[in-house]
Image: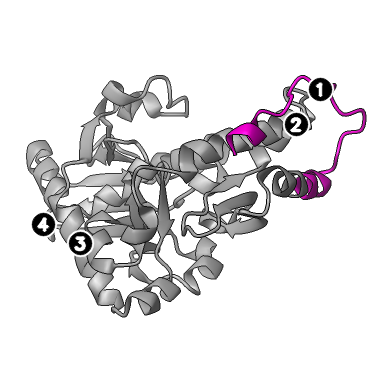
Amino acid sequence: MEKRIARDSRVSREAEVLTFEAFIDKIVSDLADICGPEFEVKRVTAIKNNSVELNGVSLREKGTLVAPTIYLEPLYKRYIDKEVSLTEAENDILRIYKAKGRPDLDVGSLFSDFSKIKDRINVRLINRESNKKLLEDTPYEEYLDLAIIYTIDFSDFNGSITIRNSHIHYWGITVDDVKEAAEHNLKNTDKVIIKRFGEMVNDLTQEECSDIIGGLMYVLTNVNYAYGASGVLRVDKLKNLSKKLGCGFYILPSSVHELIIVPDTDEIDEDCLKEMVVSINRSEVSREDFLSDSIYYYDCAAEKVVVKIR
């Protein structure tokens, strides 16, 4: 493969710009020729969060279980913008595969045994209504108007895998086994963080009346700033913050990656909060990162989160 990667990238750019479908077909065909018979190269279509459909190419060396998928939408945009030629795009894919496809970690061996991966199981919060198709074959638990799904963290492999019903069957376990492992890992993680808004984000709130609440905001996320909204499930963190503030607080779904916390004071206008959430979701948050337009509330007396405004 080393020799095959070294194709000449200094070729002239294509005179005719390919459509996205033609681009994918050409990529798959060329990579199959480049990699040879010892590799399986195929097109992959994936349904991601909020029913976002992504198209990619999967490369797997025969005899291995690892088959990284490289999604092609970003590369196609660079191709359309004439930042890369088709050949340069193909070489980029091969370089990504080299980085992702042959890790020191034996992902295949780990994945075949539930006992070896249960310490890597995480929870992830997604919008239940927008993910009906995804949830058809994904074990999940309802949480407020959202859904909790489970993923396997392969950060040392630069990725994660969403647990599907087929995985449960393959491992010969139950959904409760997955849930128990995920809850244990969430409870014992030190990655959930809550910080003052100003410490983490600059110049984000330009909306009307943000001057009233901007100085009061906190952000709940994780140390990786990725899918940190699930930190709201750490009720101990919420309880400690409520004690510190001396009141309950509103929880605004900024994205699947973070939540904004606003203490409940006399100055807070709930309509303003709703307008801000909707505005940010429409203007700042990508479709795939969208979590919810609802406003949530931590009730310190009941010590639980409720839906305040749908």
Marks 2 and 1 in Cβ contact (< 8 Å): yes
Marks 3 and 2 in Cβ contact (< 8 Å): no
Q: Is residue 23 magenta?
A: yes
> SS class of the residue under badge 1?
loop
Work out whether 24 lies above or below 40: above
- Which residue matches tag 2? 87
Q: Amino acid at mark 3?
A: Glu
- Is 299 on the left-hand or right-hand side of 201? left
Q: Amino acid at mark 1?
A: Val
The mark that comes first in sequence, 1 or 3, is: 1
- Which residue matches tag 4? 301
Work out whether 168 lies above or below 267: below
Residues at marks 1 and 4, CA–CA distance in whole angstroms: 68 Å
- Which residue matches tag 1? 11
Q: Residues within 10 Å of mark 3 (few under 14, many from 20)?
A: some
Residues at marks 2 and 1, CA–CA distance in whole angstroms: 8 Å
Q: Foreground mark, 3 or 2?
A: 2
x and y, in percent, of residue 125 in the image: 37, 56
The mark that comes first in sequence, 3 or 4, is: 3
**Which residue is located at x 9 percent, y 44 percent?**
240
Q: Foreground mark, 4 or 2?
A: 2
